[in-house]
Amino acid sequence: MDNLKLKEFREANKLSQREIANKLNMTQANYWLWEKGKSFPNAKQIVELCTIFKCTPNDLFGIKGVHAVKISELKNES
């Protein structure tokens, strides 16, 4: 799925792929696959990415409008 805005959020936060990968306890190569749309993070990793980037899942997916979900709402459901 190539509509994730990972690169945009990473660059806006002035973080390298390696820094994000380290925060997620994964390799830079695996994170790179996400940015290239060749692999996809699971739901838990999406929540972690949103925490790192201080955004909502909708922001990360580029979804605008009334369907916005706060990250705190997602954490309460698990």
Image: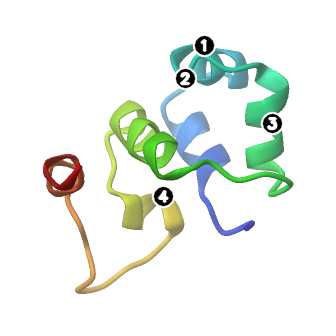
Q: Is residue 68 found left or right of 4 in the rendered image?
A: left
Dividing the picture into quarters, in which one does residue 70 lie? bottom left
How far apart are the alpha carbons under marks 1 and 2?
A: 5 Å
Q: Residue at x 70, y 16 (%)?
A: 18
Residue 7, horizontal then vertical, whole percent: 66, 45
How far apart are the alpha carbons under marks 2 and 3?
A: 13 Å
The circle drawn on residue 32 is: 3
Q: Is residue 32 found left or right of 41 in the rendered image?
A: right
**Quadrant that contains the N terminus:** bottom right
- The amino acid sitting under disc 3 is Trp
To which residue does mark 1 refer?
22
SS of the residue under disc 1: helix
Residue 25, horizontal then vertical, whole percent: 59, 16
To which residue does mark 4 refer?
60
Mark 3 or mark 4: which comes first in sequence? Answer: 3
Residue 64, horizontal then vertical, whole percent: 37, 80
To which residue does mark 2 refer?
24
